[in-house]
Amino acid sequence: MNKESITFFRDKFNTNEFIPLHVPTFSGNEKKYLNECIDSTFVSSVGPFVDEFEDLMNQITKTKKTTAVVNGTAGLQVALRLVGVKKNDEVITQALTFVATANAIAYNNAHPIFLDVDLDTMGLSPNAVDDFLEEYGELREDGCYNKKTGRKIAACIPMHTFGFPVHLDELLIVCNRWKIPLVEDAAESLGSEYKGKPTGSFGEIGVFSFNGNKIVTSGGGGAITTNNIKLGERAKFLTTTAKQPHPFEYIHNELGYNFRMPNLNAALACAQLEQLDLYLNKKRSLANRYEKFFSSKGIKFRTETKNTKANYWLMCIELENSKERDLFLESTNSNNVMTRPIWKSMDFLPMYKNCQKDELLNTRFLEARIVNIPSSVIL
Ligand SMILES: *Cc1c(COP(=O)(O)O)cnc(C)c1O
């Protein structure tokens, strides 16, 4: 079966050379916009492409105010501060995620609580959050507190794993009941939808990444999206050094960041965003072929769940057990086909090993079985 898979990958990507997991494609206005940028001398922190990028993101994510930032991690860090996370607070997230989600919590000097994912979405489980809060939550005037630690639970940050949306309605019900603001780590889910609405538009704030390996890239970059204009304006303010408007003086009256996305990167992002629909279609068609192939071999190719549309950013299969997974990883990688196991659960990382967590049963199950397979857009 592994040999047949390798042949299938080689056939689909039409090469005998190395097949990477995910590489960008530049087939639109990328060079044109980059040249315009250089000719205009506006290559740095302000420029028309930054504004254009923010407008495009408002349209694509159906949100009211986007702030372009230097990368997704920085966006997450600011998003948590914006919803009120302070030093020594706690933030609920999923154990099975890319490290940036947890790091963004730690950068705010707050403590992550790692809860389980659902088997179907691979993202934060509303039931796990509900169970946790029933056991440890205590509602006070100013929000939810953790009975075990006495600390405030100041935010909840689910992540839409590989572009598969989490159960947003159910999660929002739990978070609202416990007065916990929801921030979506939508870094992997640009173009994904839940019940017909884009991910990143459900929480108080959504955060996207435009790193080189994501579905659309700006070289490096991120976006903070929100329907709360006040919050959006504060996002822009804090990420541009918190400078008070003044014709010539420098007035900074709180701690801001230089997290701006340079115009050069925004130029690349604009050209890429124009092709998002094309990429989504190409990925969907590759996903369909994978599904047919792998199901004929008795292997589970992961597909979108009911009421959702996935962007199929990184595609994945679920092997029978960790032994099967290791055999698959071995045979593909030694044959120049890049495949990767899903991340190690955050509770195994040295800096997060003492954080509160639940049983993480689904996390352990998926950790042992999920493998990402080559997912680049094929033109
Ligand atoms: C890529 C990614 C990020 C971080 O984005 P950068 O732009 O690389 O900083 C955050 N969270 C998740 C889940 C990601 O996949």
Image: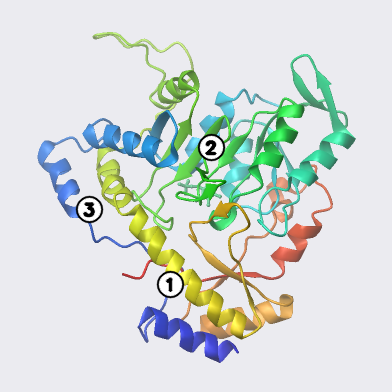
| Mark 1 and mark 2: Cα distance apart in space | 27 Å
Q: Is mark 2 within 8 Å of ligand 1?
A: yes
Q: Is residue 233 visible?
A: yes
Image point 80% across, 25% down: which residue? 145
Q: Which residue is mark 3?
A: 30
| Mark 3 and mark 1: Cα distance apart in space | 22 Å
**Is disc 3 placed on a helix, strand or loop?**
helix
135 sits left or right of 26 in the view: right
Name the N-terminal-most of marks 3 and 2.
3
Do residues under tags 1 and 2 come within 8 Å of each other at their CB atoms?
no
Using a 10 Å C-alpha cutoff, classify the residue at mark 1 as few (fewer than 14 neighbours), some (14 to 19) or many (20 or more). Answer: some
**In this orientation, which residue lies closer to the viewer: 18 or 256?**
18
Using a 10 Å C-alpha cutoff, classify the residue at mark 2 as few (fewer than 14 neighbours), some (14 to 19) or many (20 or more). Answer: many
Label ID, residue 76:
2
| Mark 3 and mark 2: Cα distance apart in space | 27 Å
Residue 200, above or below 84: below
Name the N-terminal-most of marks 1 and 2.
1
Q: Identify residue type, mark 2.
A: Leu
**Is disc 2 placed on a helix, strand or loop?**
helix
Q: Is residue 354 visible?
A: no
31 sits left or right of 197 in the view: left
Q: Which residue is mark 1?
A: 20
Q: Identify residue type, mark 3.
A: Glu
Residue 137, above or below 367: above
Residue 150, above or below 167: above
